[in-house]
Image (cartoon, coloured by chain):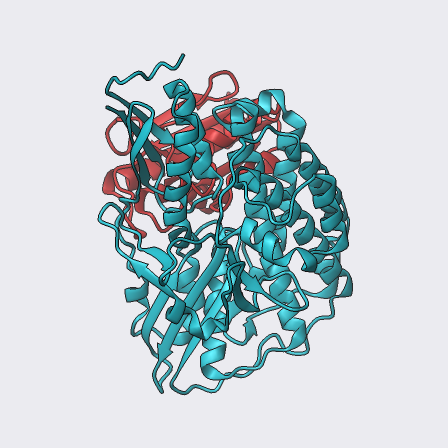
Chain colours: A red, B cyan
Amino acid sequence: MLIIGCGNLDRADDAAGLRVAAKLREMGVNARQQCGDMLALIDEWSDAEEVILIDAAITGAAPGTITTWDARHTPLPQDCFPCSTHALGVAEVVELARALNGLPSKLTIYGIEAGNFEPGDSLSPEVAVAVERAALVIAAATHWSPLLAALPKSA
Amino acid sequence: MSDTGHKSRTIKVDCLARVEGEGALFIQLKGDKVTDVKLKIFEPPRLFEAFLRGRHFSEAPDITARICGICPVAYQMSAVHAMERALGVVIDPAVKLLRRLFYCGEWIESHALHVFLLHAPDFLGYPDAIQMARDHRELVETGLRLKKIGNRIVSLIGGREIHPVSACVGGFYKVPSEPELRALNEDLKWAVEASIKTARVVAGFDFPDFEQDYEFVSLCHPAEYPLNEGRLVSNKGLDIDVAEYEDHFVEQHAKHSNALQSMLRGRGSYLVGPLARYNLNFARLPEIAQQVARDCRLAVPCRNPFRSIVVRSVEMVFACTEALGIIQAYTQPASPRAPVAVHSGVGFAATEAPRGTLYHRYSIDDRGLIRFAKIVPPTSQNQKRIEEDLWHFVSQVASRPTDEVTWKCEQAVRNYDPCISCATHFLRLQIERE
């Protein structure tokens, strides 16, 4: 299992994915951050069977809304993930990887609806709450559930 | 028969994502006759020159690097060279070579991005690289691997691949060790071969029969293909020290554009970038790159801007070869940076960004604070020339179906790999037919 948070720390809510990864690390869950060239994702996940990617999204929902996509089976909407024209964004890289048969066996995208992409390092209040919630959901789904399941049943 | 007739028609193409920055192209046709062409850059001014005023000279490389995510090294190199000229700093030859390698890394990543992912789809008939990848997997994988090698060079020297942090006035804050750079050896050997194959592949594309009488402008250096040093030279008699730049070049404001248009005084538009560098510096390319150009039947001078994809590929051969030579001979500098004594002064520099000549001028006071900054990026220098290309090119293709004209115009803009700005997403194309 590979968990990667994507985004830009200097553009307000665009940092949401990176903040989730940081939060997961605080919780003892291994998570990487990708804030450079998103094309590097194709290499990063080349040896992983299962990948979770977290990024800011723009779907038209209320800021802080968390949307998930099963990207292995459904093409990602190209206009939902913010990106610079200088580089490919998460959605373009996922679709490029699909065209090159380079997707992991399981790829789940968590999109956190952004409300503000202005310069600066402050998250919108709703997005800050969503970051905490997304980190808990991902930690529970990937680590705690198996641990809980492995605990001996009480008599 | 054309579908144009004399009807009024307007075509809009939104979200043309293979051009960097936010702008629009406006073309007006009366029948098949072009009556107006405007490259509209409506992205707001970014005010970097004003941000720099009052900042310490040592901050200029890191502030200006933020202008561009794809060519931050170019901004850093022009900034450090201008400051070093203002302050009379002498650079260790080993540091100069490291800077050259740093720049090669940026050329490789930028040219690979443009050749494989932005421009090749035009020639192969795909709307984008993703759809092209389904049919041309090997081509795209080659591009991605070349780009990654460029990224690695920038990252190793600059600390990170985008907006690197190690370059400074006098040299670098930290330099890589010999084993760290030698680790690139096998990748770069592969990259030389891959870029040679790439040049041969793209040379086989179909190119419109379109040539213009450009004034090509680039740095020229007696001993090397230009990156960081040289005089500014053109094919029409310009041959100046960079300090004379503003005696010969003037920026003008066009009402339809937020980017200033640069012109040669009394002569008008000119062209900077790969085509200009290649035409003015062919003899300084390594023999292997010259041979590839000959094998590709690439003329010198090449006046067809659509063939810039071949020229970029030849420049990738150069950059990979140059990088390989530098890492094989690399000896870690005794000191990563030269000492800098602060005093007031004025410094100028031009270096060769992937898209062309990038000019910086700074005035600093006796505390080392920047009093004035002027930055002229390559795309503002090419902006007028792009419009002129379109005036002539649209006339050639105007009788064809509108969709085809639109496609060809977008392609003509992409010949220049324009970097309209660094933070926005699309170019809108509008053709009006009366």
Q: Residue at x 50, y 39 (%)?
A: A38
Q: Residue at x 55, y 37 (%)?
A: A41
Q: Position of residue A49 (x, y in %)?
A: 62, 26
Q: In front: B278, or B93? A: B278
Q: Position of residue B389 (x, y in %)?
A: 42, 41
Numbered label tally: 0
Residue at the top extreme of this rendering = B1
Relative vertical location of residue B354 with respect to residue B34 in this rendering, above or below: below
Q: In front: B392, or B291? A: B392
Q: Position of residue B370 (x, y in %)?
A: 34, 76
Q: Which image quarter is the C terminus of chain B in?
A: top left
Q: Residue at x 67, y 28 (%)?
A: B138
Q: In front: B426, or B269? A: B269
Q: Position of residue B230 (x, y in %)?
A: 57, 69
Q: Quadrant of residue B256?
A: top left
Q: Quick check: B398 left or right of B309?
A: left
Q: Quick check: B29 left or right of B278?
A: left
Q: Which image quarter is the N terminus of chain B in?
A: top left
Q: Residue at x 36, y 80 (%)?
A: B364
Q: In front: B201, or A9? A: B201
On the question of residue B268 being in view, the answer is yes
Q: Quadrant of residue B52?
A: bottom left
On the question of residue A136 being in view, the answer is no
